[in-house]
Image (spheres, rainbow, N blue to C red):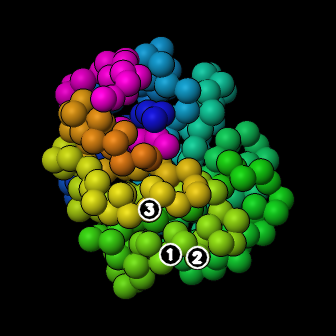
Amino acid sequence: MKLIPAIDLMEGNVVRLHQGESNSMKQYDSLSSPVDIARRWVEEGAELLHIIDLDAAFGRGDNMGVIREISSELGTPIQLGGGIRSEEKARDLLDTGIYRVIIGSMAVRNPEAVYRLLDEYDDNSVSVALDHRNGLLAIDGWRENTGTNLVDAITSFIEKGVKVFLVTSVEKDGTLKGPDVENLGLITKKDATIIAAGGVGSLADLQKLKNTGVSAAVIGKALYEGCFTLREAIESVEVTLC
């Protein structure tokens, strides 16, 4: 299982939210720039950075200047999400060096757009974000519940050729109270790359995720709150479980 550190950006700062609520913002880069924080994760072993542009997600600008700076300074692959609501924007990001785009609401509303992108780029270039509450998808920055079942949605996308999914438990996100292993356990036997996000608060949580069979896990608040270091996390999942 690969571990991917999260860098959520708002107004040029690294922040974390609780369950996606903008009024729960906590800033973490008062002493370090986003580039320095990204460099720290790379120095501790990150092979991929998970960046979410929260301003773009909420429709109030973007942080592309900072994202470009991280990319040019470090050269580490970036999977980027937040506010990617058109094929044109996705193409622009991929064509200018972003390793993978994360598409959420557009994928649910207009899945054909995702399929067209996959026809143009390789399978790893596009990740469909399936954010859910108790197994039911939520879109538009988690503000709209769709009533669509997580298992049904991922099955449909796989049948159309989607290979990579970012699965986030809204209720667990930012809580440090443990991942949603129950719903992840329903989908990890699918023929797909599942990246889990939400709820990790301890090294034991990472072992639980590894046991579900997910391909990777995004870690955010636990790193910023000092629950463990990224290096410790990587070492913990490299241990073979009995």
Q: Residue furthest top?
A: 43
Q: Which residue is mark 3?
A: 187
Q: In the rendered structure, which amino acid carries the disc numbered 2?
A: Ser
First in sequence: mark 1 or mark 3? 1
Q: Are marks 1 and 3 in contact (CB under 8 Å)?
A: no
> Tag 3: Cα neighbours inside 10 Å, few (<14), some, or many (≥20)?
many
- Queried whether the magenta region covers residue 44, the answer comes back as no
The magenta region covers: 215-242
Q: Are marks 1 and 2 in contact (CB under 8 Å)?
A: yes
Q: Residue furthest left?
A: 177
Q: In the rendered structure, which amino acid carries the disc numbered 1?
A: Ala
Q: Which residue is mark 1?
A: 153
User: Residue 156: which disc?
Assistant: 2
Q: Percent position (x, y) of residue 236?
A: 32, 23
Give the answer, above or below, for where 64 lies relative to 89: above
Between marks 1 and 3, how big is the CA–CA gap?
10 Å
Q: Residue at x 76, y 63 (%)?
A: 117
Q: Percent position (x, y) of residue 134?
A: 27, 71
Q: Residue furthest front?
A: 242
> Could you tell me which secondary element the residue under label 3 belongs to?
helix
Picture quarter containing residue 149?
bottom left
* 6 or 27, nearer to the observer: 6
